[in-house]
Image: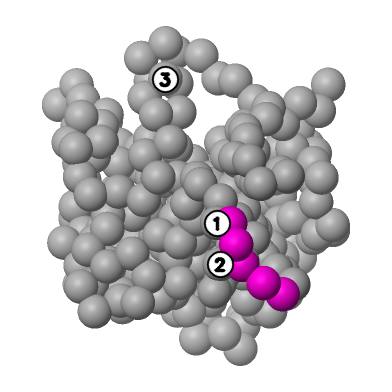
Amino acid sequence: MDNSPSSIIEAQSTAGSNGPAQKPKDAATLIITRQDQGELKVLMGQRHANHSFMPNKYVFPGGRVSTADTQIVPHSELRDHVSRQLRFKSRRKNVSALALAAIRETFEETGLLVGHRGKPHPGATTVSTSREWCDILQAGVWPALDKLEFIARAITPPYRPKRFDARFFVASSDLIQSDFDDTTKASGELINLEWVTLERALSLELPNITHAVLGLIRERYEQQTVRPPLFFRTLNGKSISETIDID
């Protein structure tokens, strides 16, 4: 969607605004990692220069949770610890919709099919009134949420024109059930879609939160360690990050 969460969320707060702050809308992003000739790459795209928010910035595919996302029964559910991490300080009960939104938005913005190809589990959704979900399901690809990792959450600071409560998921390119490099079915909301090394990604023009999340990806890759997700938000006018510790 045009209002990609990783394009809008900034790490700093805004002071001096009047009136009540907008309630942040649930959103999700999918970071797809790929091993290519011994290097780790991630899929990113650039926002158009005429976008009102973060023009020309490079981001991961993502956007708002839709009603259709709440109605999809996936081929496989989120792992228990991921579900509990997503519920940390959250009022959303259907946390699967967050991961489903990330998969749908990735298809919409890149044309890539992410999930399980083959016979779906009994009870999984096979038809939808949503155009994007209909295209995904008709291609015989079913959302496999147990393959997703949750790495970060970020809420746009108060008093911004639009606010998002965005969750950042990570998936391996093994989940892509189409040509890695075929983005001809992309919506066009992101341009210059490409697989970039972490070094190149960090040199691009990025929103603050995108830069921070790339740092988490690099830490995982270089140190071969997985730590709990981080939660970036504004509290009492100050930007903070806290570990989502469910133990």
Report the residue marked by disc 2.
160
Q: Is residue 44 magenta?
A: no
Q: Amino acid at mark 3?
A: Glu
User: In which quarter of the view is residue 188 placed?
Assistant: bottom left
Mark 1, secondary structure of its residue = loop
Q: Amino acid at mark 2?
A: Arg
State the extent of the magenta-drawn residues as a range: 15-19
Which residue does the image show at 80% across and 41% down from the upper left?
A: 88
Eye-nearest disc, 3 or 1: 1
Q: Amino acid at mark 1?
A: Thr
The secondary structure that most of the magenta stretch takes on is loop
Mark 3, secondary structure of its residue = helix
User: In which quarter of the view is residue 70 placed?
Assistant: bottom right
Q: Which mark is residue 14?
A: 1
Which residue does the image show at 35% across and 77% down from the upper left?
A: 52
Eye-nearest disc, 1 or 2: 1
Q: Which mark is residue 219?
A: 3
In whole angstroms, how far apart are the C-alphas of marks 3 and 2? 30 Å
Quadrant assignment for the N terminus = bottom left
Q: Is residue 16 magenta?
A: yes
